[in-house]
Amino acid sequence: MAQGTTARHVAIIMDGNGRWAKRRGLPRAMGHKRGVEAVRTLVRSLKGGAIECVTLYAFSSENWKRPRDEVSDLMNLMRGFIRSDLEEFAANGVRLRIVGDWRALDPDIVEMLEDALERTANGTHTVAVALNYGSQQEIARAARAAAEQGEITVETIERHLFTADLPPVDLLIRTSGEVRLSNFLLWQMAYAEMMFVDTLWPDFTPQHLQDALDEFAKRERRYGGR
Ligand code: FPP
């Protein structure tokens, strides 16, 4: 496979908000708040760039196990983020997508998201946010849907994934030094290049993304061939 290719789809596990706050003696909520600012800056930086899609892991199906206050902080940040940034998203050609079982979230969030999806539908580059997302659950659900319609094959399963109309993930970045996938886009990352960086998410800047893209361009991808 040719080297020097660009990543069309970048997936990011935004980890380390809690540690960022702890190191500063701040409440965890402050780490998440700064995490949202890092998301905002990153999304702004995509304008005019070559990346077609960024998928951000914002809330996993397992995150419900966190203390209630923290879950509620995260949901409130989501509400605030949509309220404050939707206009800018739409103006900058961002097409919002949500992956996961997001319709099970609080009804007001579902309503806000439906509106946001509609208002950004014509955007040229996609920002997909994984909300109440678990990859194993997604694959099981897609396999069930495929079976109901006939044959279970790679193609029919793929057609029922939340990401059906998105390109496969080329590059995964996980911040904060943890080296695991945490039930994120397992199917979609079958041939993804992976980068685990020590930077904590609130400190992650567009330059960090550029560094990862530069590294990606140097990697040789073989897709099982040679
Ligand atoms: C991991 O940090 C981060 C999360 C579980 C949530 C990620 C959410 C955001 C960045 C904000 C919401 C996003 C949007 C799109 C509005 P952690 O709490 O697990 O950190 P730790 O491992 O250091 O404790």
Image (spheres, rainbow, N blue to C red):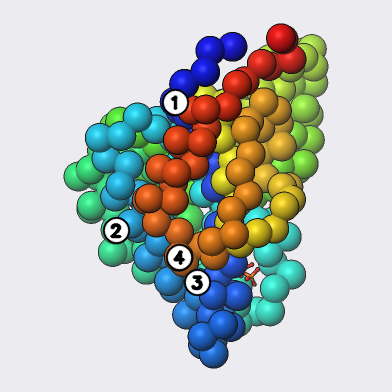
| Label 2 beta carbon within 8 A of ligand 1 | no
What residue did someone put label 4 on?
203
Q: Earlier in the sequence, mark 3 or mark 4?
A: 3
Picture disc at residue 158: none
Q: Residues within 10 Å of mark 1 (few under 14, many from 20)?
A: some
Q: Nearer the viewer, mark 2 or mark 4?
A: 4
Residue 205 lies, with reference to residue 225, above or below; the image says below
Q: Nearer the viewer, mark 3 or mark 2?
A: 3
Where residue 34 sits: x, y (%)? Answer: 43, 71
Residue 211 lies, with reference to residue 3, above or below; the image says below
Instruction: Kindly report the distance in space between the C-alpha atoms of the residues bearing marks 1 and 4.
Output: 24 Å
Where residue 213 sits: x, y (%)? Answer: 46, 36
Q: Residue flagged by tag 4: what amino acid is it? A: Asp
Label pair 1/4, CB-CB below 8 angstroms = no
Q: How many numbered circles does the render carry?
A: 4
Q: Residue flagged by tag 3: what amino acid is it? A: His
Q: Residue flagged by tag 2: what amino acid is it? A: Asp
Rendered residue at 50%/72% (across/down)? 32
**Residue 158 placement, left or right of 163:** right
Q: Earlier in the sequence, mark 3 or mark 2?
A: 3
Residue 121 seen in the current view: no
Instruction: Kindly report the distance in space between the C-alpha atoms of the residues bearing marks 2 and 1.
Output: 27 Å
Q: Residues within 10 Å of mark 4 (few under 14, many from 20)?
A: some
What residue did someone put label 1 on?
6
Rendered residue at 35%/38% (across/down)? 95
Which image quarter holds the C terminus? Answer: top right
